[in-house]
Amino acid sequence: MKHIAFALTLSLLFAVTPATAKTLSKVAAVVNDDIISTFQLDKAVVAALATNPNKNQLTTEQFEQIKTQILKNMVNDKLLEQRIKELRLKVSDPELSAAIEDVQLKNGLTPETLEQALTTQGLTMSGYREQIKNEILRYKLLSREVNYKVLVTSSEVLNYYNNHIDEYTIEPKIRVNRISFNIPTGNEEQLAKLHKRIDVSRDLLLNGEDFDMVLTAQGDSATGGDMGELVEADLAKPLQLALADLTSGGVSKPLELNGQIHLFQVTERTADDSDPFDRVKDEIEEKLKRDKTDLRFEEWQKELRDNAHIEMRM
């Protein structure tokens, strides 16, 4: 029954036309000297549910929770609009045009292709300009009321790094090619031939021969390929020792391991992270700044609400 009731409510929302809305609309909320009508709220709910893949499975309680949250968001938006007017913040036409040109440049659009893209989304250029204008106004408002009060000190960055050092430590890594030969059993002559073949292959690699060509020349007598990027500390000890002194392009001596004889060629090696703090300090500062900005924004919004006359009538 609850699902049926919600479906009926949703269908009524979609059925409301501007003409009938004037008759049906009531006050959903009062924000200082402004109101938010039930028609405006219903329109926002429909827009939100249009992108909700589970809209047809919502219970009445879930629907009401969504509606209540949307109304709270609309109240917050109204408070921002009022504060913008109170501070007399403006966006000049050249400033607005420059912002739209920046959007075009970043997305590789011309004025014509931008307008075409807007049309496919049901937007007009004038409506889009109004959206961008509102975004700029909000940016100016937040820069004035929130962002300028956010400061991250160098000691805060260092303290955060010291408390999360494991997250920023990079262990040395190595990229390796491998050729593995099966060891013949009970045949000394074949074993001697194999060692000679391995020595020839190693010399070719050391002299710059292409790895894939050397591997292919072994036919079915060997397997191998790129082992990918590996953390040296995670490798078996014999392999760590075999690779320890090799630089990029170096080839290990033959290593017998797990019933095979292997040649390993180092193709890339990352250096030790000698100064990890210097590498990550800007990243940490940005993270702390985002966290502080989010916290300050919540406090600032609460201040706006506490100092405003707000009546929720839904």
Image (cartoon, rainbow, N blue to C red):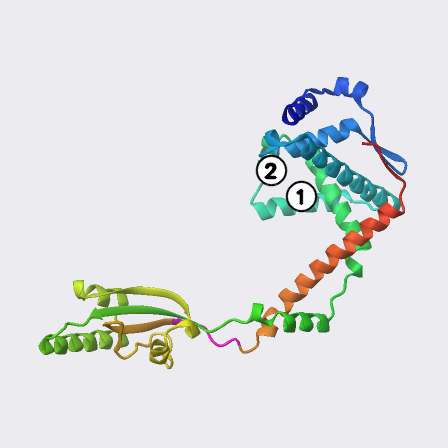
Residue 96 left/right relative to 310:
left
Residue 196 picture location, percent across and down = 16, 78
Q: Nearer the viewer, residue 127 or 245?
A: 245
Residue 160 picture location, percent across and down = 67, 69
Residue 225 picture location, percent across and down = 29, 64
The answer to whether 10 is drawn above or below residue 211 in the figure is above
> Callout 2: helix, strand or loop?
helix
Three-letter amino acid code of the residue under disc 1: Ile
Q: Residues within 10 Å of mark 2 (few under 14, many from 20)?
A: some
Residue 181 picture location, percent across and down = 21, 70
> Callout 1: helix, strand or loop?
helix
Q: Residues within 10 Å of mark 1 (few under 14, many from 20)?
A: some
Tell me the residue that label 2 is attached to: 114
The answer to whether residue 210 of the structure is visible from this angle is no
Query: At x 23% / y 77%, what residue is drawn?
Result: 203
Three-letter amino acid code of the residue under disc 2: Leu
Q: Nearer the viewer, residue 56 or 230?
A: 56
The answer to whether 172 is drawn above or below residue 93 in the figure is below
Principal secondary structure, stretch drawn in magenta: loop
Query: At x 82% / y 25%, what residue is drawn?
Result: 26
The answer to whether residue 215 of the structure is visible from this angle is yes
Q: Quadrant of the N terminus?
A: top right
Tell me the residue that label 1 is attached to: 100
Q: Quadrant of the C terminus?
A: top right
Q: Are marks 1 and 2 in contact (CB under 8 Å)?
A: yes
| Residue 263, magenta (yes or no) | no
Label 1, label 2: how far apart the Cα atoms are: 10 Å
Q: Which residues are magenta?
A: 268-273
| Residue 269, magenta (yes or no) | yes
